[in-house]
């Protein structure tokens, strides 16, 4: 039987299509600005970026005033792009390391003010996600904030496999697809698709994992979609997604 392609292979092969210095991908419009908004005040804060990719979000955070960024990602090519960009832009307070978020333990600090995981958990099983959340919990200062985004768990079952964003659920239903990998694609505005995948989880799994990881307050949850502003800006690109829940953003505090 053929082995599925590893996530590292997928990202090493398409790192140049992810590299960007302005909004290019659908989710650069529909999700990433919302992460910045959810983090709130970040001036002079140390931020941990799990699954940082080529560093787009962390560069946004530095521009918004963060003191330092530590990013880890399992794709050597994505990390190499992040390091090259940081060097070119003289971002001396950005540090990027290749590593698996599930097993990584070489953190440069014992405590961070905030942590993000922007579309990382859709590459991990429920058990792996819970391990990463526990690590995040232990690395946050008391009162620190964790913001993460994932594909909306209902989206694969609501949309056909058409641009500009889809996941294939095959013959799996919402409940029997749990921990199964759905391959998908998300488009850039210039018409180039990039491959993504989603290890399917239900809404309940995110809440359960946060509780098991020791986050004991209710998370804020936002179901992200295209807005009227997106539709007015580029109706051709965004209108196929009008009315669909695309991503979910969770924000949770590490209480004492
Ligand atoms: C959809 S991309 C998002 C990248 C970045 N967070 C952003 O928003 O631009 C997902 C990233 O997660 C990384 N990734 C997947 N599984 C990982 C793991 N187990 N440990 C660390 N990074 C992982 C991939 O290499 C990829 O760079």
Image: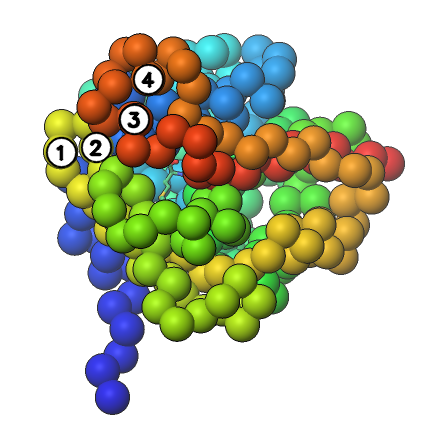
Spatial CA distance of label 3 from label 1 is 12 Å
Residue 62 in the figure: left or right of residue 153 = left
> Could you tell me which quadrant the C terminus lies in?
top right
**In this view, 131 is above or below 20:** below
SS for dot 2: loop
Provide the residue designation for mark 2. Answer: 188
Spatial CA distance of label 4 from label 2 is 15 Å
Q: Residue at x 22, y 82 (%)?
A: 2
**Relative depth, front residue between 124 and 228:** 228
Percent x, y of residue 94: 40, 27
Spatial CA distance of label 2 from label 1 is 6 Å
Residue 82 visible in image? no
Spatial CA distance of label 4 from label 1 is 17 Å
> Which of pointers 4 and 2 indicates the residue nearer the eye?
4
> Which of pointers 2 and 3 indicates the residue nearer the eye?
3
> Which of pointers 3 and 1 indicates the residue nearer the eye?
3
10 Å crowding of disc 4: few (<14), some (14-19), many (20+): some
Quarter location, residue 58 = top left
Q: Residue at x 70, y 31 (%)?
A: 220
Q: Which mark is residue 238?
A: 3
SS for dot 1: loop
Provide the residue designation for mark 1. Answer: 191
Q: Are marks 2 and 1 in contact (CB under 8 Å)?
A: yes
Percent x, y of residue 35: 51, 26
Spatial CA distance of label 3 from label 4 is 6 Å
């Amino acid at each position: 039987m053929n082995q599925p392609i590893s996530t590292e292979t997928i990202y090493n092969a398409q790192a140049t299509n992810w590299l960007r210095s302005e909004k290019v991908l659908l989710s650069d419009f529909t999700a990433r600005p919302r992460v910045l908004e959810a983090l709130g005040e970040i001036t002079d804060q140390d931020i941990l970026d799990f699954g940082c990719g080529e560093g787009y979000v962390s560069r946004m955070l530095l521009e918004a005033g963060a003191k330092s960024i530590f990013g880890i990602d399992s794709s050597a090519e994505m990390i190499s792009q992040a390091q090259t960009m940081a060097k070119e832009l003289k971002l001396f307070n950005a540090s990027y390391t290749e590593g698996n978020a599930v097993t990584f333990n070489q953190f440069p600090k014992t405590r961070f003010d905030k942590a993000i995981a922007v579309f990382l958990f859709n590459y991990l099983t429920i058990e792996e996600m819970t391990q990463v959340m526990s690590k995040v919990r232990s690395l946050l200062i008391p009162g620190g904030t964790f913001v993460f985004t994932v594909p909306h768990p209902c989206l694969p079952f609501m949309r056909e496999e058409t641009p500009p964003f889809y996941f294939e659920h095959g013959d799996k239903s919402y409940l029997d697809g749990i921990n199964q990998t759905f391959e998908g694609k998300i488009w850039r505005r210039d018409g180039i698709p990039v491959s993504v995948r989603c290890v399917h989880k239900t809404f309940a799994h995110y809440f359960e994992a946060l509780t098991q990881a020791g986050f004991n307050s209710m998370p804020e949850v936002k179901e992200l979609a295209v807005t009227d502003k997106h539709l007015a800006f580029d109706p051709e690109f965004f209108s196929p997604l009008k009315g669909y829940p695309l991503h979910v953003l969770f924000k949770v505090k590490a209480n004492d």
